[in-house]
Image (cartoon, rainbow, N blue to C red):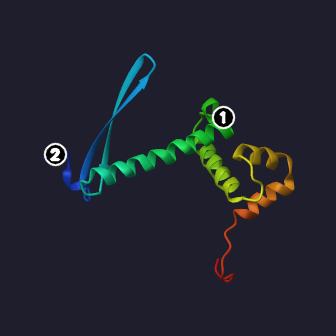
Amino acid sequence: VRVYLYKQSQWSGLQTIVKVVRTRHLWNKTTQEVMFYLSSLPADAQKIGFAIRQHWSIENQLHWVLDVTFNEDACRIRKENSPENFAILKRWSINFLNKETNYKRSIRQKAKRASMDEEYMLKILQASIPLHSNSSQV
């Protein structure tokens, strides 16, 4: 199917437009959602479908962790740049907690321990510092 886009010259690299229809059945209710994706990938349904599922898998896992660890769905931070700033800090925290691998607990348990144990918090921060093989590089 040939599609003509508004200001098509500005879409360099665009190769496919994908329409995904998701149907969800819950007890006595069925919902349907239609999503469109723009892609630089060639038209290959399996590859594009895999990329979309991979993206949403990562997104869903991150949002679940944010909600469970930081109760993000209940967060009422709304003013100016605060929501974006706190979102960055929460993601950094998750990354830092994931890099500390000696204490085999959930991210939530690690965060709680770090809030009460300064030594453990320093271990988390130390685990997050990248080590360079050549120490003269900055």
Pointer 2 residue: 3
Residue 109 point in image, percent of width and height: 76, 44
Q: Residue at x 69, y 81 (%)?
A: 135
Query: In this picture, is 6 found above or below 75?
Result: below
| Residue 31 appears in the rendering | yes
Q: Are marks 2 and 1 in contact (CB under 8 Å)?
A: no
Residue at the extreme left of the image, as rendered:
2
Q: Residue at x 75, y 60 (%)?
A: 125
Q: Label 1's element?
A: loop
Residue type (three-letter) at the residue carrying disc 1: Asn
Q: Along the horizontal axis of the image, is 94 left or right of 41?
A: right
Residue at the extreme front of the image, as rendered:
27
Q: Residue at x 51, y 48 (%)?
A: 58
Residue type (three-letter) at the residue carrying disc 2: Val
Residue 127 point in image, percent of width and height: 73, 63
Q: Residue at x 41, y 18 (%)?
A: 29
- Quadrant, the N terminus: top left
- Quadrant, the C terminus: bottom right
Nearer to me, 33 or 86: 33
Query: In this picture, is 11 found above or below 129?
Result: above
| Residue 82 appears in the rendering | no
Residue 104 point in image, percent of width and height: 75, 53
Residue 81 point in image, percent of width and height: 58, 42
Nearer to me, 5 or 123: 123
Q: Label 2's element?
A: loop
Which mark, by number, is residue 116?
Answer: none
Q: Of callouts 2 and 1, which one flags the residue occurring earlier in the amino acid sequence?
A: 2
Q: Label 2 vs label 1: CA separation? A: 43 Å
Which mark, by number, is residue 71?
Answer: 1
